Amino acid sequence: MKRKLFCMVLCIIMVTSLVTGCGKTKSTSGKGSDKLIGVAMPTKDLQRWNQDGSNMEKQLKEAGYEVDLQYANNDIQTQVSQVENMISNGCKLLVIASIDGDSLGTVLAQAKKEGISVIAYDRLIMNSDAVSYYATFDNYMVGTKQGEYIKEKLGLESAKGPFNLEIFTGDPGDNNARFFYGGAIDVLKPYVDSGVLVVKSGSVDFEKVATANWSTETAQGRMDAIIASYYADGTKIDAVLCSNDSTALGVTNALSASYTGEWPIVTGQDCDIANVKNMIAGKQSMSIFKDTRTLASQVVKMVDAIMKGGEAPVNDTKSYDNGKGIIPSYLCEPVFADATNYKELLIDSGYYTEDQLK
Ligand code: BGC
């Protein structure tokens, strides 16, 4: 009888320890294992974050770490709770791609108290002194490349125009959106000021061209309205600056539905499969390729250095101030992709198979 009781208690303890906690291995202290890394991603809705998440998980595991990977369905409160759980389950380091850069201050104060390092992944976490490092692609350069593409294709340096331009950028709560917009507008604004580029909708300022949640539907709705008000008679739209692929998808959907003029230049970012297909079909002119494998391997190097008690490798110590000071950053280099080079960039490198793009 006593033995039976002992076995039952033992079973309950084992099941409880399996169910609780974010890691698969537990240390004797009951907190997460010494190798447990929490990885918080914003959403599964956008292809890139799925790739970021799985690349991080794969590469961290290869480096000998355990991983608690969570996606928050673009819901700020869900992400806060996930990070809280990672902390209470004993994760030793957090890698976070925030939904809203300003919403993690309180939970990260707790991380800091517990001595847990935080790496901001792709998006900077604002107004928190708990962020140790930031790893991303050079966001300003992303915007510059988009602006330069439009400048070159329209021949803005010598052409008189006027050319019609419309602008779509991203979520105002995402610090990156301001960098993308800033990089592009610094290239294009002189031509808007001189009248070579005309923005018929009148929407040029960041707040006016922002797209909440980077939503395809929101971008599509705004583009539908712009076409109806300014281009319904077939007036040519020469270019649409879109900061990323989800907004570009909304814009091309609207163009396909109701625009009758000559197809404009449309920019994007991420090389999502639907957008690469549009590029091949001539509906989107370019996208920026940010190889998530490169970013993941850089972050794994940073994690490894911190976990071994050292300093993480960085290459920028001036660009990213999160409101509490400059965050040492590692910026990977983005490249532009279009119909002429996508095969080499995306298929030959093994990022996609040819079949995925059919
Ligand atoms: C990322 C982009 C992405 C956008 C929407 C940004 O923070 O840098 O690659 O397209 O978020 O998810």
Image (tube, grey):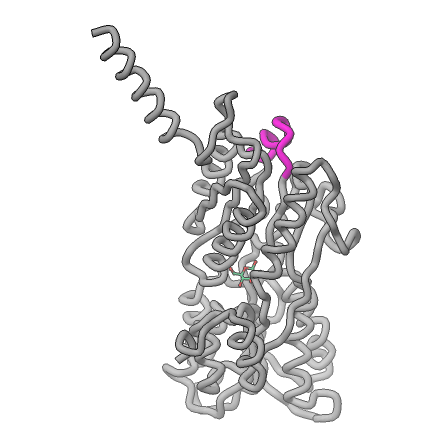
Question: Looking at the picture, how far across and down is residue 18, in whole percent?
Answer: 37, 30
Question: Looking at the picture, how far across and down is residue 276, in whole percent?
Answer: 48, 77
Q: Is residue 344 left or right of residue 148?
A: left
In terms of depth relative to the viewer, which is nearer, 327 or 177?
327
Question: Looking at the picture, how far across and down is residue 42, in whole percent?
Answer: 48, 51
Magenta span contains residue 357: no
Tell me if residue 179 comes above or below residue 342 in the rendering.
Answer: above
Quadrant of the image containing the C terminus: bottom left
Tell me if residue 43 comes above or below residue 218 in the rendering.
Answer: above
**Most distant residue in the left direction:** 1
**Most distant residue in the right direction:** 318
Tell me if residue 122 comes above or below residue 105 in the rendering.
Answer: below
Q: Residue at x 71, y 75 (%)?
A: 187
Q: Is residue 355 left or right of residue 324?
A: left
Q: Residue at x 51, y 26 (%)?
A: 27
Quadrant of the image containing the N terminus: top left
Q: Main secondary structure of the magenta part?
A: helix
In terms of depth relative to the viewer, which is nearer, 50 or 307?
307
| Quarter of the render that holds ligand 1 | bottom right
What is the total number of numbered labels drawn onto the structure image? 0
Can residue 200 be spotted in the picture?
no
Magenta span contains residue 108: yes
Question: Looking at the picture, how far across and down is residue 35, in whole percent?
Answer: 56, 36
In terms of depth relative to the viewer, which is nearer, 117 or 43?
117
Q: Quadrant of residue 196?
A: bottom right
In terms of depth relative to the viewer, which is nearer, 340 or 208?
340
Q: Quadrant of residue 22?
A: top left
Q: Write the start and end of the magenta stretch as one range.
A: 107-117
